[in-house]
Amino acid sequence: MTWKPMSRIVGLTVGVVLMLGVGIACPAILHAQGPPTSYSPVVINEPFSDVVERMSAAKPEILQRHMQFLESRYDLSDASATGVTMSRGKPIQVGVRVRLPQGVDSWEALAALTPEQIRENGLWPRGFLPLPHPNHPEGGMVFPQHQIDEILEQEGRDLTRFDLDFDLPEHLLAEYPPAIFLTTRTDLGDVSQGQVITLQNYFELFDGILNPKQLEGLRLLVTPFPQQQFNATNDRRSLRPSMGVTCFDCHVNGHTNGTTHLVGDIRPQAFRHRLDTPTLRGVNVQRLFGSQRALRSIEDFAEFEQRAAYFDGDPSIATKKGVNVLERGSQVHFMSEFMSILDFPPAPKLDIFGQLDPELATAAELRGEVVFNGRGRCAECHPAPYYTDNTMHNLQTERFFDTEEYLGRIATGDGPIKTFPLRGIMESPPYMHDGRLLTLEDTVEFHNLVLRTQLTEEEKRDLVAFLRCL
């Protein structure tokens, strides 16, 4: 076993920090020298036309380097399951996509090693390391092309960035458009009617189904407001001045389209986590919001997103670009009231306690439930009926690898991460807070290593079969 990481760093120097950008990186001034800072520059001295020319010219090389990086980590091919689909018919992707490290013959051989042996020999799979943003030193919201096309067609609003494109293939993302299920009208099933909900159609589709507060909350969720990369200033990444983005540009139909970003609560830039947009389905049963921020209510989440997350947690930039200050007693409440009726997709094989009905489940699914509640140790953090304990856990992945840098990302341990619900999990790829795991099989292999559960191949297959039932 001779595989070694691409690079390793023992310590962080000021030079490395400056190279990767200080505070929140702004490529317009990356050449500038100065001490590390938590703030972005408010005044941009480079003409906007020069920024566009420079960053557009750099885009092909950045994308090529990043895609080569992804290919070195993952099998990105389109390999879907037979007869297993999401609510509106999209087949789910199957198989372990993370590549084994060179010199390791099987996942079983890797799982037999101790964390110390894996770290000392550089054998932690590259796909299990934190996933960098498509351009980590730059960061910011990046939308899948199908979302860009749909919003441009419906509203004439362009979510294209002149400097960057989304990275993961569409077949590895949630289905589009996703279904919408409401806790208040379970009799209606999917109320999306196969449409992406925007300002153009929300009233037609939901008038008579929602109460006036919920309808106003939905309107706010599909209304564009200024954001870091999409705004009217010269400090933007859209060619034309922009009205901004909406909550549902990322959480499309109250679910997710895989849009990525960087979390706003970490400095310097190289340590910021890539963000995989989580689904809003089932937020009514959750008590923590944000993968690490541990916001305590859906109201806190709604207000935080537009006042802070839209602007990388920098209030000075928010003021400059046009922050939308929501009124807590009405607007925040209305938005939260709508989000709180977004339901999980139906799970016909689960009983009222969130457990498998033995008369409906297959033998493999029933065995997988036993693994989930037993040797797999999944239920310790993800108990039924909604498969979350509404707290945070630190998996201490730093046991398995040395701190290292790649593509502007410095990989360390992830720290405490909230327990996301597993209800409807097969409809929400990719997985983990940063989207580093592309399939349920990847997720099982990751936790088998981290938790050191030593599951057999049959147990892992059965566990995946059970997760598809949730």
Image: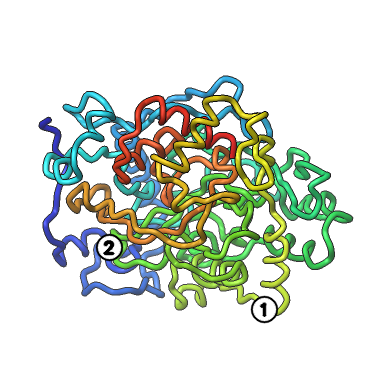
Along the horizontal axis of the image, is 145 left or right of 39?
right
Secondary structure of the residue carrying numbered label 2: loop
Q: Which residue is drawn at 26% across and 38% down?
A: 125
Secondary structure of the residue carrying numbered label 1: loop
Please tell me in which quadrant of the rendered image residue 270 appears. bottom left
Identify the residue under disc 1: 327
Q: Which residue is drawn at 58% across and 47% down?
A: 256
Q: Report the disc number at residue 21.
A: 2
Q: Which of 55 and 329 is in front in this view?
A: 329
In the image, what residue type sits under mark 1?
Glu
Please tell me in which quadrant of the rendered image residue 336 appears. bottom right
- Locate residue 311, reporting x and y percent: 48, 67
> On screen, 406 above or below 12?
above
Real-space CA distance between mark 1 and mark 2, rounded to the nearest whole angstrom: 35 Å
Q: Which residue is drawn at 51% across and 61% down?
A: 390
Quadrant where the C terminus lies?
Answer: top right
